[in-house]
Image (spheres, rainbow, N blue to C red):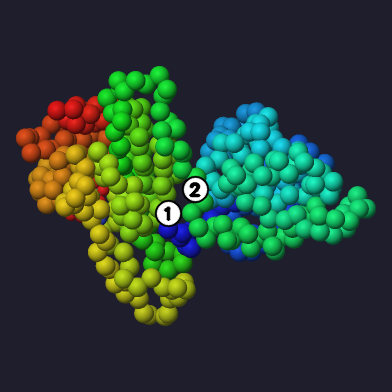
Amino acid sequence: MQPNSLQPKRILLIVGGGIAAYKVLDLCRLIRRKGLLVRAVMTKAAGEFVTPLSLGSVTGDKVYGELFSLTDEAEMGHIELSRDADLVVVAPATANLLAKMASGLADDLATTLLLATDKKVLAAPAMNLRMWAHPATRRNVAQLTADGVTFIGPTAGSMACGEFGVGRLAEPPAILVAIETLLAGDTAIPLPEGAWADPADSGLRPLSGRHVLVTSGPTHEPIDPVRYIANRSSGKQGHAIAAAAAAAGASVTLVTGPVALADPYGVTAIHVETAREMQDAVARAMPCDIFIGAAAVADWRSGDVAGQKLKKSAGAVSELTLVENPDILAGVAQAKTGRPALVVGFAAETTDVIAHAEAKLARKGCDLIVANDVSTSGESPGGVMGQATNTVHLIDHTGIESWPTMGKEAIAERLVARLAAMLAQ
Ligand code: CTP
């Protein structure tokens, strides 16, 4: 994913139980001063050193602690909590926490999140020098490094226990630099190839062995650091299609614009902001057997993105110069080499749904168009975007098939079954 400096990045801070825990209050202040968001999770032992109240006041967010908290699970499940962040930071990473991480233990919220996360982890250890030097800790650090965990510190100095040596938590400004360095790159950890495959699946599911690439959600096109061009797409239909394709046995790559939805289970999700980032991510995820363009890609972007917030000046209205975005669907459908066997587009129309969709089928060169009326007075009164149901018409080179109003999941399943049958022919 292209790093996007316009969207505040989120840090999930796991606070371990060590005397250095008080320093994370300072770290949180520094993180927020940089315009980043931070949400804290405390281990039980951390509660002996800092209070949820003090952490909450510096993060400006709820502080999480219990794995089996009904309220927390209802508000934000622990899986979502682990996926919502761009980077996970463990500070102080105690010897106990490192040992649990190295063994993949998940017996509280903090360790469960560390095992469930799909983002890179930065650990800032702090402990007594003998604990740091102990062969067990050395083994754990070596294992975690091999697993992809990045370490910052510990540094040398005098310790709370009165001894002198290596084991002090790195200073918050140094941890911040490490955070910024990691955030400058891609922090997502993709699932290993085939990780979602059911070992009992002997290739009998309709899309077993196939790669399905889906775009979903809107794109956001920046105007200046605080404003962007967007549309009302929620991503529900595209995400439901990705989930249905995964359930049908496909390996699925979902390239999604900014949405308020969790990544569907068993798909490799790539998060992007703009149409050009989406185009890049699609190009990198190719080749595929089926491409489904369900995203509501913004047709235009600002031709001149301002580096600073545009200010209004009395009486003058600034003009926005628009530049056309690349047509991702047409690019895939008209590719000279490596064209997917099936290319499916969506047509979001407010008038003459069928006629416009037929024109799009020909113009873009795809095999199937799923057309829907997105007006608020059309087939789905109240509109389609953001709603749970949809009314679609399938248009291909042989004719039109209209489906009754259905839930977006049901449409996704039926569409995927239909595509699997087309591919098998
Ligand atoms: N699409 C795309 N890249 C774009 C614009 C659209 O990949 N820059 C894809 C959408 O994902 C969808 C299909 O093209 O599958 C049709 O999108 P839609 O917004 O309905 O049509 P447009 O191409 O934008 O045409 P128009 O503005 O004339 O409706």
Image position of 305 (left or right of 157):
left
Q: Which residue is mark 2?
A: 188
- Place residue 344 in its image quadrant: top left
User: Type of residue at label 2?
Assistant: Ala
Name the residue furthest right: 162
Q: Which mark is residue 400?
A: none
Q: Is residue 122 above or below residue 76?
A: below
Disc 1 packing (10 Å; few <14; some 14–19; many ≥20): some
Residue 1: numbered disc: 1
- Between 352 and 189, the one nearer to me in the picture: 189
In the rendered picture of this protein, how many numbered marks are placed on residues? 2
**What is the x, y in percent for residue 13?**
65, 48
Determine whether the residue tagged by mark 1 lies in a helix, strand or loop: loop
Q: Is mark 1 within 8 Å of ligand 1?
A: no
Question: In the image, 366: left or right of 310?
Answer: left
Residue 375 position within the rendered picture, expressed as x and y whole percent measured from the top left: 24, 45
For label 2, the SS is loop
Label 1 vs label 2: CA separation?
8 Å
Amino acid tagged 1: Met
Front-lying residue, 216 or 236: 216
> Could you tell me which residue is drawn at 87 percent across and 54 percent down?
159
299 lies above or below 207: below
